[in-house]
Image (spheres, helix red, strand yellow):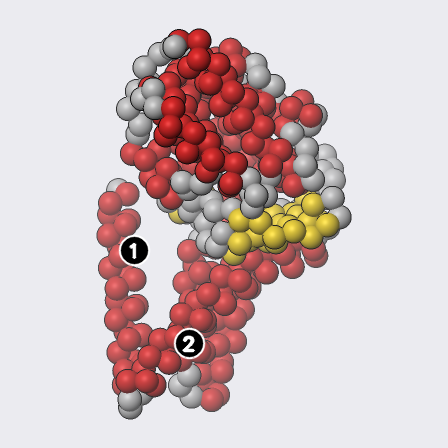
Amino acid sequence: MKNIKKTCFFVVGCLIGGVLGAVMAMRTDTLPELLMAFVLMFAAVYAQLILHEAGHLIAGLLTGYRFVSFRIGSLMLMKTQGRWRLARFKLMGTGGQCLMAPPAMVNGNYPNTLYHFGGAIMNLLWAVLAGLMLYLTGYSAWWLGTMVAGALMAATNGIPMKAGMVDNDGRNAVRSLHEEDVRTGFYRQLQINAALTDGQRLRDMPAEWFACAEGQEHERGYLRFQYLLDQADYQAARELGERLMECSLPGIHGALLENDMRCLDLLDGKTPAAPSKALGQLGKAMPAYPAILRSRYLFALLEEKNEEKADKIKGQFHKMLDAYPYPSDTKADEALMALAWQKYKKDQ
């Protein structure tokens, strides 16, 4: 089924690209004009990405949210402890992200539907505006690109579906409407992200933010697991991790959990299983992510017994911290790296 979806998206993408290319070729007389048309087309696509995240921002502000961060690609603007800061962060499966602190929850509810759909609504509005401009003023590569990109982004983000390893906005919105665990889990994630942005560690946040009752593993299990890691309660983390592995966590959390459990295996003197395809994809897409660098350090040190390689990876880890938006979130990784070093020296 996944291969069929990928093939369909590829075919549709090729058809749209072919039609747009043909239209631009017919509307231009010289090669420089054609090249400029392509530049305008790509600029329109990028502008739609920015507008999408701006839609989330506006929707959040209209419903009582507080600004936390705004990311396009890997460049992030964030407000931490009242100060503005630029940082770098890349999340697999996303081209950008607007995160905000939610208003207070009342009777288990808070405004989230408009926040989820805000980006798709903004894309759709601009697609309609671009179509109107094309109708009134005639052909323009900019407006054509804006219309097509806006319509595609509105559809791929607004129609509920899973985008790679991550639920898209529409799926998040629909699930939040009908599933209390999803709604509460998303709320906790926004709270935790806001606290991390202000420099708090997971272990210092309220314990109830990380509660995970039976049946809530898919939505809140990995947050609980991370909390236990930061508490240095590795036995409890392992027990929960084994339960979560059986649940097959969806999306990126499943790959991150596998990565963490392989590290705990190494520290316990066990031989980890070979990495899954999902974990391999995660490592390639997010090579500078703290947990990925920590994992590479542990394997270089404890499995390969290559101290020089481990030192190089450790240097990459500390260099990454200069631009990483959540330095307090890396303390648990540093603790695991310190444990690995102690085990390595002990085994010498």
Q: In which quarter of the image is residue 141?
A: bottom left
Looking at this view, is 243 or 161 the one in front?
Answer: 243
Residue 286 rendering spot, x and y as whole percentages = 41, 42
Kind of residue sitting beneath label 1: Phe
- Quadrant location, the N terminus: top left
Residue found 28% across the figure and 43% down from its top: 2
Where residue 9 is drawn, which disc sits there? 1
Q: Residue at x 28, y 89 (%)?
A: 30
Instruction: Check disc 2 and report the residue beneath it.
Output: 40
The mark lying in front, picked from 1 and 2, is 2
Near-viewer residue (57 or 236) = 236
Q: In this view, does 117 lie to the left or right of 46?
A: right
User: Going by the image, does 97 lie left or right of 257?
Assistant: right
Note whether residue 110 is visible: no
Q: Is mark 1 on a helix, strand or loop?
A: helix
N-term mark: 1 or 2? 1
- Tell me, yes or no, whether the two marked residues, 1 and 2, touch with CB atoms within 8 Å: no
| Secondary element at tag 2 | helix
Question: Which amino acid is tagged 2?
Answer: Leu
Q: Please tell me whether residue 112 is drawn above or below residue 18 in the rendered image.
A: above
Crowding at mark 1 (Cα within 10 Å: few <14, some 14-19, many 20+): few
Residue 156 pos. (x, y %): 42, 56
- Residue 278, numbered label: none
